[in-house]
Image (spheres, rainbow, N blue to C red):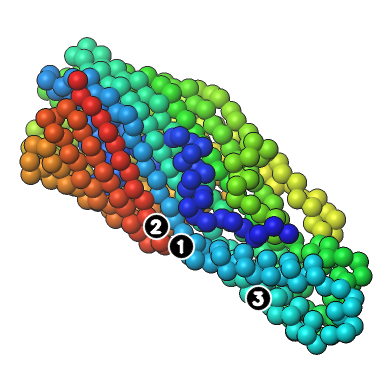
Amino acid sequence: MKKIIRLSVAAIAVTVATQASAANTWAEARNDAMGGTGVATANYGSAAFINPALLAKAQPEDDVTVILPSVSAQITDKDNLQDEIDRINDRVDYYDDVVDNLTLQQVLLNPVGTLNQFQGAASELADELDYLRGKTASANAAAGISVAIPNDVLSVAFIAKGYAHARVSTSIDQQDLTYLRSIQNSDSVALFEAGKAALLGSDEITRNLNSVAFGRAAIVSDYGIALARQFDFGGVPVSFGVTPKIQKTWLYNYTASIYDYDSDDLRSSRYRTDNTGFNVDAGVAADLGQNWTVGLTGQNLVSRDLDTKSIEVRNGRTGEVVNYKDTYQIRPLVTAGVAWHNDLVTVTADGDLTETKGFKSEGNSQFVGVGAEVRPLDWLAMRAGFRADVKDNESNVFTAGVGFAPFNRVHLDLTGLVGEDDTWGAGAQLSLTF
């Protein structure tokens, strides 16, 4: 047996981030710091990530803006798996060693010592499996680059962005626990199983352990051109924007016996499928007077259902082969936003009108966020916010960040978040205005 579940949350985050090179369907450090808002407040330079209509909100003095890049990551480890992982590995290694080293001579010449060691190892492993029952860890990451070119007639932006989600969960077989507890609590069962292992090999023991671990990851990359234009309706400036895009998706379905699980394999092409298709984002924004802006955006307006690979896992106890497969759902995400702003302060709120879907094996989410930005100096901005999932499937988080803009040419935005269920994250964005 290999070490049990090397699923440290840090490893998941690295898997997602390095594979995605790519949370949200976007990374935008300014608005991420304001509770994940942006539908009514995104700057024209980053509008194509969130609401392409805001691309047309550039001022006459605004120039070409290049973002290279914007990145963010979020990790949730509500079950403290990071703290448990070393102990889990230790218990499995110990049990593995005890079983592999059982000999008939040991059982006959030192039955008490052998049984005590065998029963102790079974007890410790059962305790850890019991703890792992229903536990999960997840990570999200996103990244993007953009070139925004404002124009009075038609504003244009070229974007490449990606977002990724990974989740590890366990399915503990109750018969594993029953088997291990029977060794722990019965000398006769322990003696029988020890003798069987000594005569027939350790596989006679380990084939009775059939708990499963699941590693799911989705990476979605978008490559598109955003187009936006502003119109005047009865004195109300209204902007419309659209982003047709090529969408590339990679799905990973790493499913294995929990006793052979190695998180490094989550990145293996053996468990990966990929798909390329077309999608589109669209948005609208309107200025209601001098200080109010409202917006509406739709991300991924073309629905797509993408299946993972089907992975076979054999049950050593019954010989049955079980096929594990999942489906990743890309669905329209419609979000409304409103903002009040002046030269010093921006206050904003966003709310999803539709649910965020992902793997069918996971629950859906629906977010609301509020945030504010204060600009005490021309080159300094301070931000804070709060984001909540009304479906209670994702952690609620507090966000904060700062922005620096020396000479209004180089912009560096930093954000951080912390929330319930041991959730934390960070983001950064560098943009240049020419």
Decide which of 397, 116 is in the foreground and name it: 116
Quarter of the rendering occupied by the N terminus: bottom right
Which element is circle 1 on?
loop
Question: Where residue 78 is drawn, which disc sits there?
Answer: 1
What element does badge 3 sit on? helix
Q: Is residue 364 left or right of residue 203?
A: left
Circles 3 and 1: CB distance less than 8 Å?
Answer: no
Q: Nearer the viewer, mark 2 or mark 3?
A: 3
Q: Position of residue 252 (x, y in %)?
A: 60, 40
Query: What is the three-letter code of the residue carrying label 1?
Result: Lys
Instruction: Report which residue position mark 3 lands on.
Output: 124
Q: Residue at x 78, y 85 (%)?
A: 113
Residue 136 vertical position relative to residue 296 in the rendered view, above or below? below
Name the N-terminal-most of marks 2 and 3: 3
Side of 43 where 141 appears, left or right: right
Tell me if residue 294 comes above or below residue 322 in the rendering: above
Marks 1,2: beta carbons within 8 A: yes
Residue 423: mark in rendering: 2
Measure the C-alpha gap from mark 3 to mark 1.
23 Å
The structure residue drawn at horizontal position 24% and vertical position 34%, both measured from the top left corner, is: 42
Query: Tags 2 and 3 in contact by the CB under 8 Å rule?
Result: no
Q: Please rate how many residues cluster around mark 3, counting C-alpha atoms within 10 Å: few if below 14, some from 14 to 19, many from 20.
A: many
**Can you give x and y, in whole percent of width and height, for residue 325 in the image?**
67, 44
> Does any portion of residue 350 appear in the rendered image?
no
Query: Quadrant location of the C terminus?
Result: top left
Q: Amino acid at mark 3?
A: Glu
In the image, residue 395 lies at what x, y percent?
A: 40, 57
Q: Which of the marked residues, 3 or 1, is nearer the chain's N terminus?
A: 1
Pointer 2 local density, CA inside 10 Å: few below 14, some 14–19, many at least 20: many
